[in-house]
Image: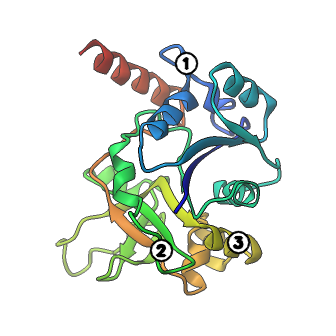
Amino acid sequence: MKTIAVIPARYASTRMPGKPLADVLGKPMIWWVYQAAKACPKLDDVLIATDDERIADACKQYEMQYLMTSPDHDTPTGRIWEVSTKVEADLYLQLMGDEPLVNPAAFDLILPDTLPEDPYYVAVLTNIMEHPADVIDFSNQKVVTNAAREILLISRSPIPYPKGTLDFEYEKVTGIQLYSKQALAFYHETPKSILEKAEENDMMRFIENGHKVHAIVSPYKTVSVDTPKDLALVNEILKEKHHA
């Protein structure tokens, strides 16, 4: 079984252009994610998938393996599908390049020891949300699952609605996701689904078409860098960590 990590990286960003190259303690933010993946013994390879020469130049400078992909992808999953057509593997681990605090221990939770029987295997790490403000934040994509930990719905709204009880914990999806090669092919060949368009979550394409998406709770939380304020926070956290 061969498993590779793919870090999708685009330069264009509405809120923070050039985000993958943002300075984090003197190195590009994406370098920190790449190093975390390289520290995982379960991964056979790690590469950055980009459509921008500026990111490619940074990859060359810091000796990070990369692959140029089409600028036409509108989702990270689409970019990883393209990688799957050029780099052979059984499983593809998606790591978002804007989470430089990612803990390599989280990868062990989602990476299986043997190849899953389901040829359309998809899994995602989730985090328990601890603050009420996070639950109503539309940028946090909440999930509900069945008893087998298969996702029933992903929504930016607070789900489930707490009408009859508060005896549950809200979960959100993270940027750590796992796809089989066949699942990525299905994603590419299948039109966007209704709920996917509404919620802007590409995993709904699998769910609406009857494929399972496994949710695995992770205790390892990180900070997604979406604004200069987030970037300053990440730098401060890493400074304290390195000083300690």
22 and 46: which one is in front? 46
Q: Amino acid at mark 2?
A: Val
Question: What's the amino acid at mark 3?
Answer: Ala
Give the number of the mark in front: 1 or 3: 3
**Amino acid beneath label 1:** Lys
Q: Is residue 228 left or right of residue 85?
A: left
208 vs 124: above or below: below
Q: Secondary structure at mark 3?
A: helix
For label 2, the residue is 213
Image quadrant assignment for residue 216 = bottom left
Number of numbered tags placed on the structure image: 3
Q: Residues within 10 Å of mark 2 (few under 14, many from 20)?
A: many
Q: Which residue is mark 1?
A: 27
Q: Residues within 10 Å of mark 3 (few under 14, many from 20)?
A: some
**Residue at the (72%, 35%) spot, across then down:** 11
Element type where label 1 sits in the image: strand
159 shown above or below 127: below
Q: Position of residue 95 (x, y in %)?
A: 53, 47
Where, quadrant-wise, is the C terminus in this rendering? top left
Pick whichever, 2 or 230, lies toward us: 2
Mark nearer the N terminus (1 vs 3): 1
Establish if 232 lies above or below 187: above
Residue at point 69% right, 59% down?
84
Looking at the image, tell me whether mark 1 or mark 2 is earlier in sequence order: 1
Q: Which residue is mark 3?
A: 185
At x 41%, y 64%, the residue is 142
Percent position of residue 88, x then y: 68, 58
Instruction: Kindly tell me whether residue 40 is visible in this rendering.
Output: yes
Q: Earlier in the sequence, mark 2 or mark 3?
A: 3
Q: Nearer the viewer, residue 114 or 103?
A: 114
